[in-house]
Image (spheres, rainbow, N blue to C red):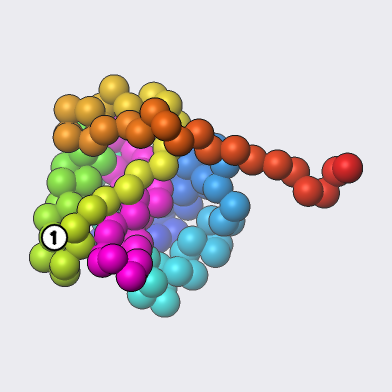
Amino acid sequence: MKTITDFMPQIRKALSYGSRYTAEELCAEIVAGRAQLWHQGDGMVVTQLDHKPSGRGLYFWVAAGDLDDVIDLHRQACEWGKSVGCTWATFVGRKGWEKVLVDEGWKADKRIVFYEKDLTHG
């Protein structure tokens, strides 16, 4: 049975695209039960419940590995999310995910752009 440490290379790569979390911090969230690790075959997904005053959502934090496995895990996570009262899901990822996610019912919100500023330099 695989554990979180088996997925560290994929987690590090996925987080390198712009997350402010380290792989170790993400793993700590999973171990503490504040995030969920989904895995099968060569795919893995990490989700986290998103609690808002208006309800509960499911945030897809990291997805990596074999695409077919990742899509199947995405479906499993969405079903689980519904079972625990989630009424929406969010996914932030590279632009390339859009072509796959559209087939799964996701819609890109073209009104939102993710901005980033480095506060350590001037």
Q: Quadrant of the N terminus?
A: bottom left
Q: Is residue 94 left or right of residue 117?
A: left
Q: Position of residue 66 (x, y in %)?
A: 29, 35
Note whether 13 is above or below 96 in the view shown.
Answer: below
Crowd tier of the residue under label 1, counting other residues whose Cα lies within 10 Å: few below 14, some 14–19, many 20 or above: some
Q: Is residue 12 left or right of residue 121?
A: left
Q: Position of residue 56 (x, y in %)?
A: 26, 65
Which residue is at 34% across, 54% downward?
59
Quarter location, residue 29: bottom left
Note whether 103 is above or below 87 in the view shown.
Answer: above
Which residue is at 17% across, 27% downward?
103
Q: Quadrant of the C terminus?
A: top right
Residue type marked 1: Lys
> Bounds of the magenta span?
43-67
Q: Name the residue tied to disc 1.
A: 82
Q: Position of residue 7 (x, y in %)?
A: 41, 51
